[in-house]
Image: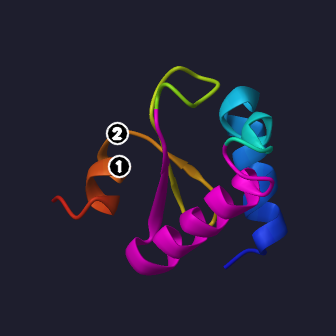
Amino acid sequence: MFSEDAHYEFLKRYYRAEFFEGRNGSIWGINYSYNLARVGMNMLERYGYGIILKHESITGETIYYDRSLTILFGDRITQALGGR
């Protein structure tokens, strides 16, 4: 698996700034982006994939990614979610 820093940088690249580091502060918490990255790491460890929701992603689409920080498409999303 990759480092926490690599995962953080991945999220920073694919999240819209206002939904990631833009939320660090008094309202969401000074370490909001770090905490969000930790939740994502836990999801990767437990389920094998992570998700960036479409309203939060720079693409405007939901982003599914795996433990190697590879963005998943099509059938690979279904497989990651446990489908056949």
Q: Name the residue under label 1.
A: 77
Name the chief secondary structure element in magenta: helix
Q: Can residue 43 be seen in this view?
A: yes
On screen, residue 15 versus residue 3, left or right, reads left
Q: Which of 76 and 29 is in front in this view?
A: 29
Which residue reaches farthest front?
26
* Stretch of the chain drawn in magenta: 28-53
Q: Residue at x 81, y 52 (%)?
A: 9
Q: Residue at x 63, y 66 (%)?
A: 68
Give, as a three-letter code, the residue at label 2.
Gly
User: For residue 59: magenta?
Assistant: no
Q: Where is residue 54 shown, x and y percent of the image?
A: 46, 28
Q: Where is residue 5 shown, x and y percent of the image?
A: 84, 66
Q: Where is residue 18 shown, x and y percent of the image?
A: 72, 28
Is 64 located above or below residue 15 in the figure?
below
Is 45 located above or below residue 51 in the figure?
below
Residue 74's label in the rendered image is: 2
User: Rounded to the nearest whole Å, what is the CA distance between mark 1 and mark 2?
Assistant: 6 Å
Give, as a three-letter code, the residue at label 1.
Ile
On screen, residue 77 versus residue 67, left or right, reads left
Is 7 located above or below residue 25 in the figure?
below
On screen, residue 10 versus residue 61, left or right, reads right
Q: Can residue 16 be seen in this view?
A: no
Mark 1 nearby-residue class (10 Å; few <14, some 14–19, many ≥20): some
Q: Residue at x 47, y 25 (%)?
A: 61
Tag 2's secondary structure? loop
Q: In which quarter of the image is the N terminus?
A: bottom right
Q: In which quarter of the image is the C terminus?
A: bottom left
